[in-house]
Amino acid sequence: MTILVTGAAGNVGRYVVDYLVQAGQRVRALTRDPENTNFPEGVEVVYGDLTVPASLGPALNGVTSMHLITFTSEGYGPLQTGREIVKLAKEAGVQKTTVLWSGTNGPVEQAVEDSGLEWTFLQPTPEFMSNALLWAESIRSEGVVREPFGDSLDAMIHPADVGSVAATALTTSGHAGKIYTLTGPEVLTISGKVRTISAAIGRHIDFVELTEEQARERMRKKGADEETIDFVIGWHANPPKSAYTVVPTVEQVTGHPARTFARWVSEHVQHFNNP
């Protein structure tokens, strides 16, 4: 069987591809830029744009299972083409799908639930460990991280763990109709994450706690609208309990414990050190 991975070049998608290849599966990676990819040997790379369902015909040909994202490639909002995508998938013979889920039922989620496909929803904690790469430049150039709400808690997750759960659900039985909440193995604060990076690079990093208004102004300068700013600031100021409640789902599904932030940092330490 062939498994199609949408968002294959993304934060989670590349790990889905890697784990499926390790499991000996035939993998087709969907991307809008096939010429600029670096996938494992044997992966079939195809062009496709989820916002233009008509572009997906060749990508879906012969596919029996798929990993589906629910947001635009730029991450600006939910895909509005869920009905068309799912209809094409069913017509192509797709039987099973995993869905990378934000926790809100949008057009893709609703279409999948109504489709009769065998589905598994994956809901990772909103904070990926890879988000720490946003600090890389200021750490390299100034030795500083600037963020509001230094004591804000979250159980951030390694993207590889999400990819591992997706690959397991796509290749083994017992996952149909399940909604898997996914977290890392520990609860961290922003200042705690900074200390972890500092220990890994062997260099002190200053943590400067921004005021709420300073954080809002920084987002405005980056082009964020007020609605988005209100949501992001509100979430970090008062995160929901689910964001900092560790659950054992990764280990229960895959058989291996969720990766720590210290491990993620050790894998990406080169980004925080000057050349």
Image (tube, rainbow, N blue to C red):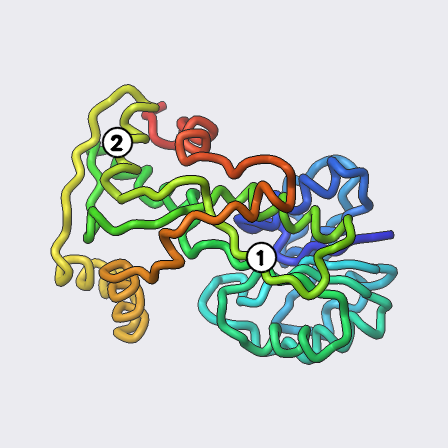
Q: Position of residue 261 (x, y in %)?
A: 41, 35
Q: Position of residue 121 (x, y in %)?
A: 61, 62
Image quadrant where one finds the C terminus = top left
Q: Which one is earlier in the sequence, the residue at label 2 or at label 1? A: 1
Mark 2 and mark 1 residues within 8 Å of each other at the beta carbon: no
**As drawn, which residue projects farthest toward the top?**
202
- Residue nearest the viewer, comparing 132 with 223: 132
* Mark 1, residue position: 180
Q: Name the quadrant containing residue 126.
A: bottom left
- Residue nearest the viewer, comparing 258 with 54: 258
Q: Name the quadrant containing residue 135.
A: top left
From the image, state whether disc 2 or disc 1 is nearer to you: 1
Secondary structure beneath label 2: helix
Q: Is residue 266 left or right of residue 252?
A: left
- Residue nearest the viewer, comparing 190 with 53: 190
For the point 75% across and 66% down, which residue is it?
118
Disc 2 marks a residue whose amino acid type is Arg
Q: Position of residue 244 (x, y in %)?
A: 36, 52
Could you classify mark 2 by the number of other residues whose Cα lies within 10 Å: few (under 14), some (14-19), or many (20 or more)?
A: some
Disc 1 marks a residue whose amino acid type is Tyr
Q: Is residue 28 above or below residue 208?
A: below
Compute the Cα span from label 2 to label 1.
30 Å
For the point 70% across and 47% down, which residue is it?
168
Q: Is residue 188 above or below residue 3?
A: above
* Mark 2, residue position: 195
For the point 81% across and 38% down, which residue is it?
24
Secondary structure beneath label 1: strand
Q: Is residue 78 above or below residue 137?
A: below
